[in-house]
Image (cartoon, rainbow, N blue to C red):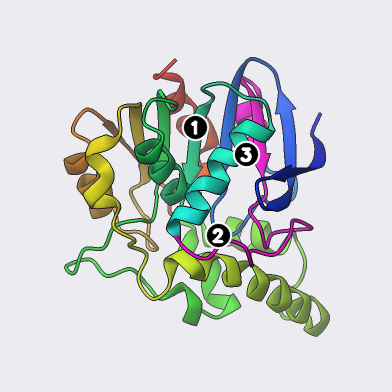
């Protein structure tokens, strides 16, 4: 059963979803937030006690006004661990959340001993430019984020009609608030210098990437592996950037190898 509550984490009050039983796992979501009836959280909950906070600017969490740069987001993640009373949780981040999780593991290297980075932002390769998320139209998003475009359309709209004017207006308002948060560390390019700090990461690490990722080309998985040579890279076929929802059981199995 999924439960949720509002907690104060540092300078921001945020909603946290909790589910499952077992080893504590802190999951930091990507740019799309936590989806309705989130299948990835359900898969994680079969093995872990999952804590999934909404970043500031998502759902009814506070706006991200107090968070201005990468260090602020990193410290907010560490504040979440403290506010939840966790000790060395398994830290898992996807996309935007993976970027934050990687920074947390570099800044607090002695406090994070298991780390999973799922198609994280945080690097830039001139040979593989990342699409401009901020210029994408709502109709572009399923194809940009999912290998299975029909599945992506259903999940991103919660089964509603993307062409319905009222739904589209609400969708755009919600998306603008989320991108206001994400833009602080992703715009104009999603690189805030992690490559210079990666040497500090001590955590046992797995990097997971969908082989059909159009948002973050799989070449970035290889780039993370070069920075984190002790990490293991798991490539997932028939999955895009939202590999967490297209192949949730495969992703959980990759995480479980760190147990």
Residue 69 visible in image: yes
Between 245 and 82, which is closer to the camera in this rendering? 82
Query: How far across and down, in percent of the image, does residue 130 sit?
Result: 33, 68
Q: Is residue 222 left or right of residue 47?
A: left
| Local SS, label 2 | loop
**Residue identifier under label 1:** 91
Q: Which residue is mark 3?
A: 80
Q: Which mark is residue 234?
A: none
Range covered by the magenta-colored residues: 40-69
Magenta residues: mostly which secondary structure?
loop
SS at mark 3 in the image: helix
Q: Is residue 195 above or below residue 250?
A: below
Q: Earlier in the sequence, mark 1 or mark 3?
A: 3
- Relative height, residue 199 to residue 184 (above, below): above
Under circle 1, the secondary element is strand
Q: Using a 10 Å C-alpha cutoff, classify the residue at mark 1 as few (fewer than 14 neighbours), some (14 to 19) or many (20 or more).
A: many
Residue 176 colored in magenta in the image: no
In the picture, the quarter occupied by the N terminus is top right
Give the left or right position of residue 147, taking residue 168 as reference.
left
Residue at 58% x, 77% y: name it: 139
Question: Which residue is outermost to the bottom?
Answer: 165
Whichever of labels 2 and 1 marks the residue nearer the N terminus, that label is 2
Per the model, the C-alpha gap separating discs 3 and 2 is: 18 Å
Percent position (x, y) of residue 200?
27, 36
Label 3 or label 2, whichever comes before in sequence order: 2
- Locate the C terminus and report the quarter of the image it occupies: top left
How far from the left and from the top, in percent, is residue 10? 65, 46
Residue 22 falls in which quadrant of the image? top right
């Amino acid at each position: 059963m999924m439960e949720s509550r509002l907690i104060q984490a540092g300078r921001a009050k945020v909603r946290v979803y909790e589910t499952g039983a077992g080893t504590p796992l802190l999951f930091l979501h990507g740019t799309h937030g936590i989806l309705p009836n989130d299948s990835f959280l359900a898969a994680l909950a079969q093995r872990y006690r999952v804590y999934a906070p909404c970043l500031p600017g998502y759902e009814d969490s506070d706006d991200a006004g107090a968070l201005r740069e990468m260090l602020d987001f990193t410290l907010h993640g560490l504040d979440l661990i403290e506010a939840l009373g966790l000790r060395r949780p398994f830290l898992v981040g996807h996309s935007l959340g993976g970027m934050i999780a990687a920074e947390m593991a570099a800044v607090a290297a002695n406090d994070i001993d298991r780390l999973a980075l799922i198609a994280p932002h945080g690097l830039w390769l001139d040979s593989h430019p990342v699409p401009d998320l901020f210029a994408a139209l709502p109709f572009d998003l399923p194809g940009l984020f999912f290998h299975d475009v029909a599945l992506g359309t259903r999940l991103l709209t919660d089964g509603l009609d993307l062409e319905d004017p009222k739904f589209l207006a609400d969708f755009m308002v919600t998306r603008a608030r989320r991108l206001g948060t994400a833009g602080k560390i992703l715009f104009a390019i999603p690189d805030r210098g992690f490559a210079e700090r990666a040497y500090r990461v001590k955590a046992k690490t797995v990097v997971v990437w969908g082989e059909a990722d159009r948002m973050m080309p799989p070449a970035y998985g290889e780039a993370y592996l070069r920075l984190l040579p002790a990490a293991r890279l798991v490539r997932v076929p028939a999955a895009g950037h939202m590999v967490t929802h297209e192949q949730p059981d495969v992703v959980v199995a990759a995480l479980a190898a760190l147990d």
